[in-house]
Amino acid sequence: MQLNFHFITNIGILFILIGLIMLVFPPKYKNYWYGINTKWTVFNEESWAVGQKLFAYCHIGMGLIFIIAGLFISVANVHGFSFVLLLIALWKMSTYFVNKKLSNLINDKIN
C-alpha cells in the first residue's frame, strides 16, 4: 500500500493534537481509558502526573517526526509498512524513555 503526503501528515497532526490535549486536560490518576499506564506511571499520583506530561511531549515529538517523514513521501517512493514500523519503534522508544525517567525520579526520592 502506497501512502501519500496528506495521510502521513494527518497522522502527525493527530499525534500533536493528542499530545496537546493530554497537556491541557491531563488524565486523572489510574484512568484506564485516557492516559498511559505503565509500571512506573501507576506507582503514585506524582509519578502519574509526571509520566503523563512526558508522554504528552513524546506524542508531540512523534507527530513532528511523522510530519517530517511525510515530507519525504513526495521525494521517495516509501511503502506504508515502513510507517507502521516507524510508529511501533517511536512508541516503544517513548515508553522506554518515560519509564527510565520515572524510575530514576522514584529511585532518587526513595534513596
Image (spheres, rainbow, N blue to C red):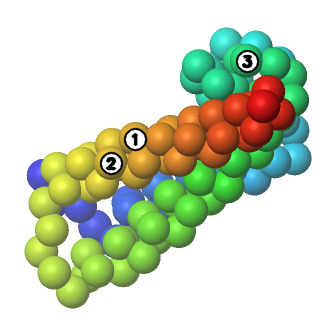
- Identify residue for label 1: 92
Amino acid of disc 1: Lys
Mark 3, residue position: 43
User: Does 63 sit above or below residue 68?
Assistant: above
Circle 3 — which element? loop
> Which amino acid, mark 2?
Ala
Tell me the residue that label 2 is attached to. 89
Give the percent coordinates (x, y) of residue 13: 57, 60
Name the residue at 42% across, 48% down.
Answer: 93
Q: How many marks?
A: 3
Residue lying at 50% horizontally and 58% vertically, measured from the top left = 62
Where residue 109 sits: x, y (%)? 82, 33
Mark 2, secondary structure of its residue: helix
Residue lying at the far front in this picture: please name it.
Answer: 111
Q: Earlier in the sequence, mark 1 or mark 3?
A: 3
Using the rendered view, name the quadrant where residue 2 is placed: bottom left
Measure how far apart labels 1 and 2 are at the Cα level: 5 Å
51 lies left or right of 69: right
